[in-house]
Amino acid sequence: MKNKFQVTEAELEVLKVIWKKKKTTSKEIVDELLYTTNWKSKTIQTLITRLVDKGALDVDKSSKKGYIYSPNVSEQEYKKVANESFINKLYNGSLNLMLSTFITDNQLSKQDINNLKNLLNEK
């Protein structure tokens, strides 16, 4: 399961398209990414293949429209693992240190502060 989450930034862009569409063909993925990136069609196809090989995508080969791709990992699941990895790498696993650094290093509006207080109070 962990291997699914080890994706490159480029592979993540492909996943974002698939998360948005739920189920989609490679043509639809390529069309969207050709519009939003400067990648070639072959590059996008390679990224899709890598995601299938990593187990991050399921592929249905039975459709007459072409292969249908769907995510094998939800966006929320990916974010959870990515967040944990980020906190472990940069803050030695300390969420407190990460939040303290963020709050100290950034200007927070009163609305931001109130939202953070509300989130903490809910916990």
Image (cartoon, rainbow, N blue to C red):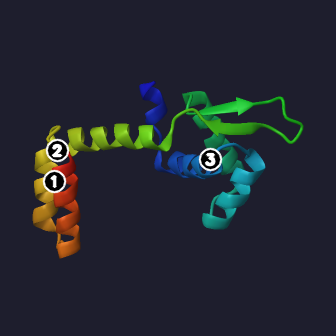
- Count residues near mark 2 (Cα–Cα under 10 Å), then give few for <14, some for 14-19, many for 20+: some
Pinpoint residue 11: horizontal percent, then vertical percent: 54, 45
- Secondary-structure class at tag 2: helix
Identified by mark 1, the residue type is Leu
Q: Earlier in the sequence, mark 1 or mark 3?
A: 3
Contact flag, marks 1 and 2 (Cβ < 8 Å): yes
What distance separates the C-alpha of mark 1 from that of mark 2? 6 Å
- Left or right, 37 with respect to 28, comes to left
Q: What residue sits right under mark 2 in the picture?
A: 95
Residue at the far front in the pictured view: 122
| Residue at the image position 17 percent from the left and 74 percent from the top | 110
Residue at 43% over, 37% down: 77
Residue 109 visible (yes or no): no
List x then y, in percent, for residue 103: 14, 62
Mark 2 belongs to which amino acid?
Leu
Q: CA distance from mark 1 to mark 3?
A: 31 Å
The amino acid type found where label 3 is placed reads Ile
**Which residue is rendered at x = 47% and y = 40% of the image?**
7
Q: Residue furthest top?
A: 1
Whether residue 2 sits left or right of residue 112 in the image: it is: right
Write down the residue under mark 1. 99
Residues 107 and 36: in front is 107
Which residue is label 3 attached to?
18
Residue situated furthest right in the rendering: 64
Q: Quadrant of residue 40?
A: bottom right
